[in-house]
Amino acid sequence: MTKPRQSSFRRVLLRRLLLLSIPVLLTGEVVAYKKARSGFLETARQNLTASAVRKADSLQGTINALRSNLATATSSAALRSGSPSQAYEFLDQFQQASPVALSCVQLTDLQTQKIKASTCGKTAIIPVSGSNWSSIGGREFAKPNAVRISLVRPPRTQAPLNNQLNLVFSAPVQIGSNIRYALSAKTALYPQPEPESNSITGYTVVIDQDGEILAHPIAEQVGRNVNQEVDAERLKSLVANAIAGKQDALSLFAFEERGAEWLAGYSAVPIALSATETRNWAVLATISLDTALYSLEEIKQVLIILTLGLLTAILLSTLYLTRDLARPIEQLSDYAMQIRHRYAGDRAPKDFKVRELNLLAEALDNMVDRLEDRAKELEAAWQEAQEANQMKSEFLATTSHELRTPLNAIIGCVRLVRDGCCDDRNEELEFLQQADDAALHLLKIINDLLDIAKVEAGKVELNLQSVSIQNLCHQCLKMVQPGAEMKRLKLTINLDDQIERVLMDERRVRQMVINLLSNAVKFTPEGGQVKLGAWLGYGRQLQLDPRPDRSPINPETPYLCLEISDSGIGIPEERWHLLFRPFQQIDSSLTRKHEGTGLGLALTKRLAELHGGTLSFNSFPNNGSIFRIWLPLIELSKPDLPAIEEAHSEVKHPVSVPNS
């Protein structure tokens, strides 16, 4: 009677486990497939939107670069010389040096309408005349806004040879007060190679605000209007949303001959075709739905194989599970049946090799391991707390010393004057001047403490305004000049002539520069030298310097760099990590040679980060230090950054400014 009941229990348990596990497994596979599909689609939409934004930014950047290069080229002496050979040599060099591939560069005589020099034959790439720039005059001819942009459209009777965006840039060449020549350059943007099957950057489509298709993966579509397309309503809605400033993705149908569904991310970019005409172009990153879901087929195959494997595993594990569950029950049943006849030392069987018990043992081992790890973490946290407590004690001792010293000086000088201990009025004024100097020093310490507290609390707001860098740097030098004269230090300044006014918070930037100059004066021995420089550069130059903040830097971002260097004692590399910590000094003992609370560099770093910039530094023992404040340029009166970067590619030698 025992074996049939045992066998029945196994069959019931097996059937129940299979009925519960198989539907759950299949449902999970279906849900996982749908989630994967929706995830791929959402990822494709996000990537296409980001790709469209990048393509729009790249298109605008390319056009602006070509416009600036062409405007700069019009001032070349070779073009104004009248020599065809010199003009051709310059055009050939300009075409080869252009960062964007140019198919043709021509110089046209506006009086005779003849090609004076060309890199692609004597056929004009586009008709030009002096009336094109009738609304511009004077110095505006040499600026980028004088460059006209024209679209090269194939004739209606001729199929387009490619699916590129063909543009012609034309700029006037002024001789004296007249426009004599027109410099034209032709380029073809967005060649459309077949993307890889797993690529989701998408084809590039450019549509004018009037609906004209300027670039398309299918060459025959170039020049058509979206109203002529099968899915015209969606395309018009997409163009309208892009022109309105929206950045999103949209599904398109019948985007090409097969009528397949496509995904398109879109953005818009304003293109100034001339000084008086600006057009909005919608830039699309498009990809077919099959390409977007290319990896889903592999996942589908994996899910099918995984389902079959899991079904087999579930069946086998269920068989073993029912056996392992039935066996201890049978043993416990036999034990229950024989309980009346058991001996005193008998116990219930325990060695069942039940998986849950093994898992429990493993869980206990894991728990012990986690407790040991937790004990190590607590030990490390305790050590960090001890270090923080030590740092706090050192800071309190240092700060109390720094506060007590000027306060004692103020009290002593004031009491001497009050008690009439001075011999004459001059001695009284001398004591009052000492009290005033000590009060100002005390005020600076308190201001640093309050400023670092405000920055840490996020309560500092910048007051951005246009600031003259020349005046700011000279004012900062005047602030530290008395201290430099006392130590017979040589102050030098090196300012780029092309820097005029920059948008910044003048008070905060002055505070940063004075902090670094004060440190340079403080740590430079007598007879040394302190330099202040200001120049313009890009993020790629910032990446070469050590920084306390290792966040990523865009190499193309323009920066204003304020550089303070000295010939002081320098800082050992093993102590660099302490430089920008609040309340931390390289030497925090009360017997150190130089005074300070350790807040200057930390505050300077926070203020630079509030401007969106950062600090970089370099220092070696006995060889001085260099600290640079990098502030991203928001507004600049002379934004000729390529020329400025070339001028600052080598180390500049500062010009000495006498101490006055």
Image: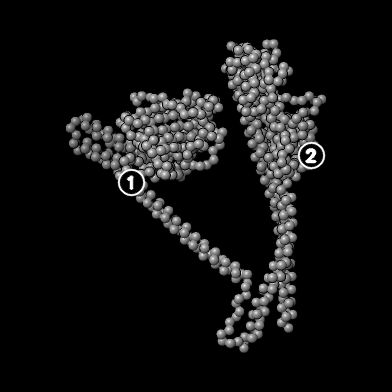
Res 6 seen here: yes
- Say whether disc 2 or disc 1 marks the residue closer to the N-terminus: 2
Point out residue 78 in the picture as x, y percentages from the top left corner: 60, 15
Point out residue 523 in the picture as x, y percentages from the top left corner: 35, 36
Helix, strand or loop at mark 2: loop
Picture quadrant of residue 289: top right
Which disc number belongs to residue 384? none
Q: Residue at x 68, y 49 (%)?
A: 39
Q: Residue at x 31, y 29 (%)?
A: 488
Mark in front: 2 vs 1: 1
- The amino acid sitting under disc 1 is Ser
| Quadrant occupied by the N terminus | bottom right
Picture quadrant of residue 330: bottom right
| Quadrant occupied by the C terminus | top left
Q: Please say if the residues under marks 2 and 1 sit with CB atoms less than 8 Å apart.
A: no
Q: Residue at x 62, y 85 (%)?
A: 339
Which residue is more in the foreground, 57 or 308? Answer: 308
Calculate the distance from the C-alpha at mark 2 to the C-alpha at mark 1.
76 Å
Picture quadrant of residue 14: bottom right
Q: Is residue 641 left or right of residue 317?
A: left
Which disc number belongs to residue 589? 1
Above or below, 74 against 243 in this view is: above
What colouring method underlies this structural image? one colour
Above or below, 4 against 135 in this view is: below
Which disc number belongs to residue 254? 2
Q: Residue at x 22, y 36 (%)?
A: 417
- The amino acid sitting under disc 2 is Ala
Q: Is residue 648 left or right of residue 406?
A: right
